[in-house]
Image (cartoon, rainbow, N blue to C red):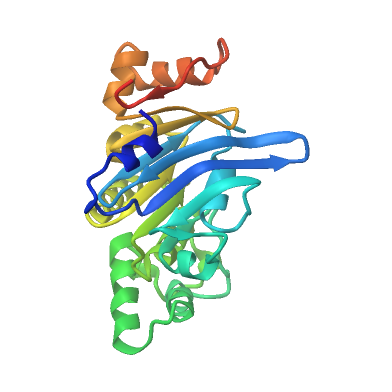
Amino acid sequence: MTSSQRIASAPPDAEPPLISLAGLTRRFGDRLAVDDVSFSVGRGEVVGLVGPNGAGKTTAMRMVAGFLPPSAGRAAIAGIDVVERPVAAQARLGYLPEGAPAWGEMTPEGLLRFVAAAHGLTGAARRRRLDGAVALTGLDAVRRQRIDTLSKGYRRRVALAAALVHDPPALILDEPTDGLDPAQRQLVRRTIRGLADDKAVIVSTHALDEVTAVCDRVVVLAAGRLVADDRPEVLAARVGGGSLEAAFLALTGAGGPAPGRRHRSGA
């Protein structure tokens, strides 16, 4: 069953997905980077997006976040088309891109104040959201320290806090635990699980243990195509003989044959 079929068969009073991709495609010249990808993420779901390098994960996320126009297809945040109404869609999205982009001369608190203001937050509401983002990401001890003096792990957490500060209903997190030590990684994973209570979250990662730790579903891309969409334990059992890593290798053709047919939930 495809994502579009699942959406179509939902009860009429069901909440629409907070993140949706429908036939999303992107070409760079003759190269097809993302090929007709469709899936959706509802409130309360954490979906892991995995695939080998060059599979199209970052390109897909940049299209959903409104930073790269699709060649074909549609992406929407909370039902708002990201091409037709980019500002409204991005106001409802928290996006953590690859790396840890931030202004090094600013402090975490200064950066978060700036980002919150850019989202229209002022006064007590801005202070409440800022303090909440600092607490969620464990930044209180360094909130007034220059960002360029922080470790890679702390800089990553500052960027995560910036994605959270306006309390968006949808989150796209590209390698959220990259550069973190084990204790920091556990903190961020707990944060993601806690956020999922009332948000839709996509986590792109190369760490399959992160998928099993925080994700309800896993979407696998290979050569720009969606080749699987299912619960991690189901995918591991049906395709990998109980191992998610074996399933990943079988589906993506990493180190072996090219990927075969798509595996969807209920297939």
Residue 248 rendering spot, x and y as whole percentages: 44, 22
Residue displayed at 60% across by 27% down: 223
Q: Position of residue 145 (x, y in %)?
A: 46, 73
In this rendering, the answer to whether 133 lies above or below 200 is below
Q: Name the quarter where the N terminus is drawn.
A: top left
Residue reaching furthest to the right: 29
129 shown above or below 230: below
User: Which residue is the extreme one toward the bottom?
Assistant: 123
Of 166 and 230, nearer the camera is 230
Question: In the drawing, does residue 97 fall left or right of residue 194?
Answer: right
- The residue located at (48%, 74%) in the rendering is 111
Tell me, yes or no, if residue 70 can be seen here: yes
Quadrant location of the C terminus in the rendered image: top left
Q: Residue at horizontal 56%, vertical 63%? A: 84
Place of residue 204 in the rendered image (x, y in percent of width and height, measured from the top left): 45, 42
Q: Residue at x 46, y 55 (%)?
A: 76
x then y, percent, for residue 146: 51, 72
The image quadrant of residue 128 is: bottom left
